[in-house]
Image: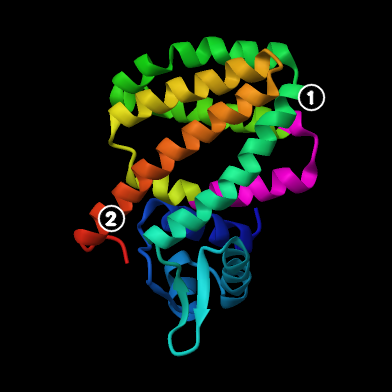
Amino acid sequence: MRASDRAYRQLREEILDGELAPNTVLAEVEQAERLGVSRTPVREAFSRLVNDGLVVAQTARGLVVTELSVDRVNQLYELRLALEDQAARLAALRGNKRVFLALAERFRAAPELVRLGELGLPRYYDLVAEFDEAIDDAVENAYLTAALVNVRTHLARIRRLARHDPDRLVEASREHLLIVEAIAAGDAGLAAHATHVHLHKSKTHFVATVERHLRGGQVA
């Protein structure tokens, strides 16, 4: 793996996990020394992070990690709603029914994975990732898929703030089940409606999560 790829992956994960907090200043020399690479790979990594929207240039401070705020969550969900409603519709019309029937079976058992805590959560998140991949394959639209991947990157930051709420995760797993069942049935309208309901509940939960962290001084 190239040095720039290693630097990018490490910095990206640290931002998504909150180790590099919002408004953290990223200095090229400092990060090169910390990551054990030269400045050129770090410069390339910074460029990719800017393209991801995880880092932004501020004239007086240089590059900083982007903020998490209620406004940003609302903007993210405005885009998610447009993209994921359409993706669900297309998946219902174009997707392999057997793929989604198999996912439905696994989502029926997902609440038990959540209740296992740290023993089951990685398997639950892997299942959600497989669901996303199945949607991407089904829509057969590279432009829509690329837009969804970008949105999921930012969603990951917010989702990791809320990872310790098992009640919400159980509820979300049931919402995913309804979406998957609708897609497997080829019901585009129901798939879009179920997606809309899921996103509304998800946004409400994440807005509350960000507000709590803002009050606690943990998120800029």
Question: At which x and y percent is residue 57?
Answer: 52, 79
User: Of 162 and 122, which appears nearest the observer?
Assistant: 162
Query: Which residue is painted at 54% across and 35% down in the image?
Result: 196
Q: Is residue 142 magenta?
A: yes
Residue wearing tag 2:
211
Is residue 61 placed above or below 145 in the rendered structure? below
Query: Which residue is painted at 70% across and 11% down in the image?
Result: 98
Residue count near mark 1 (Cα–Cα under 10 Å), binned few <14, some 14–19, many ≥20: some
Question: At which x and y percent is residue 138?
Answer: 74, 28
Judged left or right of residue 213, residue 138 is right
User: Of 3 and 182, which appears nearest the observer?
Assistant: 182
- Main SS, magenta region, reads helix
Question: At which x and y percent is residue 89?
Answer: 70, 30
Residue wearing tag 1:
94
Give the extent of the magenta segment: 137-154
Q: Quadrant of the C terminus?
A: bottom left
> How many numbered marks does the figure carry?
2
Q: Name the amino acid type tagged 2.
A: Glu
Is residue 207 placed above or below 110 in the rendered structure? below
